[in-house]
Image: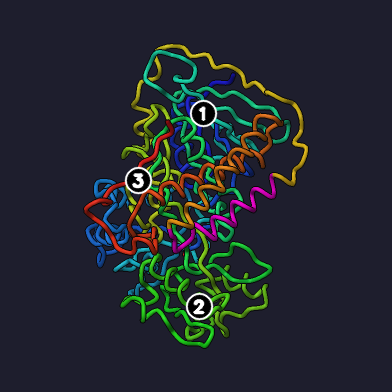
Amino acid sequence: MREFDFIVLGSGIAGLSFALKAADRGRVALITKRALADSNTAWAQGGVACVMSDEDSFELHIKDTLDAGAGLCHEDAVRKMITEGPERIAELMKLGVHFDQRDNGNGHHELDLGREGGHSKRRILHFRDTTGHEIESALVAQIASHPSIEVMENHMAVDFITTGKLGYAMENSCVGVYVLDEATGVVETLRSDVTVLATGGCGKVYLYTTNPDIATGDGVAMAWRAGAVIANMEFIQFHPTCLYHPAIKSFLISEAVRGEGAILINERGRRFMEHHNPQKELAPRDIVARAIDAEMKRSGAKCVYLDITQKPADFIKSRFPSIYETCLHAGLDITREPIPVVPAAHYQCGGVKTDLHGEASLRGLYAIGEAACTGLHGANRLASNSLLEGVVMAHNAFEKATRRQRNPVSIDLPEWRSGSVQDVDELVVISHNWEEIRRLMWDYVGIVRTDKRLQRAATRLRNLHAEVQEFYWNFKITTDLLELRNLVTVASLVVDCALSRKESRGLHYTLDYPNRDDARFMRDTVMRRI
Ligand code: SIN
């Protein structure tokens, strides 16, 4: 058993920001499934929403967030994130993060603020169209050279260790974690009174996603197994515009492209958003994604098109260099032709339910970033609010975790016991089940739902769960098997939450209950393992 002052799982903006702050107070173990810089954050294109101009105000950003959240945002969380944003942005800039600037016409430079759907003002800080990469690189550079941080790459957390399971007579607390070293196959036992889960979302539960392969909902699944409260998993955000191309998977075409004037057209070249919402292409994401879904279902077309050709080519190349280059590589010149796009799973608005300092219902376990449900997003996340939440919540969790007294009793953790040392005999079962989950979630638990489809998914997931458990107990664990185990758990949570919400609200839209029902459902969907 190795002991640390803090254990951090995940290396996106939330995990890295927490680790950097905590490292000045003690020893930090930073666990990451792949390389340090592999995270969902690194893929973020749009930027960070933050009130930074005189024309904007906290109240306007708060109102936009509450409007998008369709009645389920927690106003105290929204206020906290938005009003604390500028201070956290200043810290990021001090750490070396650059945001684009522009000439303000008086010979001075000011932040070049972008616009995205649902925002009434320009307030998106960005670095071209690779904001996440810029933030990730700056934080990784700081982490890599910090003497108090032990980075454990290619290590995957298996399960939390709780006092309840160990039989201690005290409030159930998280006191450590078992971690698989992928290279050796050895499971290590790590002990700490503070475990921070910053493992991101679960986009890979769907066949089509804008997320990287690592987004398998590991943190939520682990927290669920440990008995923590999980909330609002039915609210999965589908990004309206993922590139539709046979050779390129999961490539996002940023909402900022629409923010700069791109229009959506169908296969006949006709604009259609005006039939769906007065804000047209800048309507909130759920509305745009559903409109595209309806358009594709109506016409039978495989995609719709995003057209930015009316903007000067030089502007497109300098504002969206990564999108321009990636599409050009695929044989598509976006300065001259429209971009084929489809909606794809993008963001998990629910997660491990936390207080305003990121602590979960299990003492000593903190969840920050996409893995958490703080109340900021409600039933639908406003674009670019998530990097903001990640950095603000890292700070708040750090404050609480360092104020809190450590466990008074000394706790010894049992070593991991491998039930079986057999290698998985048929790897095909793992890959088949992965694909089956992703396909069934796409077909039955997508943008438009019905009870019948959800029931069908629930039944199939129950069988898959039993099959995966059998594998888990009978064979040597691997990263693939652990990810599959987490995927099936998270998929079931999405379905169970969706089945319990008998109304349509925000990102959850069902043909069986097409209207919002405030009398019965103006509340979070809360789940806890019994
Ligand atoms: C985008 O660039 O469209 C993504 C921004 C976000 O999801 O917040």
User: In this image, 406 relative to 241: left or right?
Assistant: left
Look at the image and tell me in which quarter the N terminus lies: top right
- Which residue is identified by label 1? 160
User: In this image, 219 relative to 361: left or right?
Assistant: right
Range covered by the magenta-colored residues: 430-450
- Is the residue marked 1 within 8 Å of ligand 1, measured from its CB? no
- Which residue is identified by label 2? 306
Q: Is residue 270 above or below residue 529?
A: below
Q: Is residue 361 above or below residue 119?
A: above
Mark 2 or mark 1, which is nearer the start of the sequence? Answer: 1
Query: Residue 234's x, y, as percent?
Result: 42, 52
Are the residues tagged 3 and 1 within 8 Å (C-beta)?
no
* Disc ID at residue 525: 3
Which of the two marks, 2 or 3, is nearer to us in this view? 3
Identify which amino acid the numbered label 2 is placed on.
Leu
Q: Report the coloring of the rendering.
A: rainbow
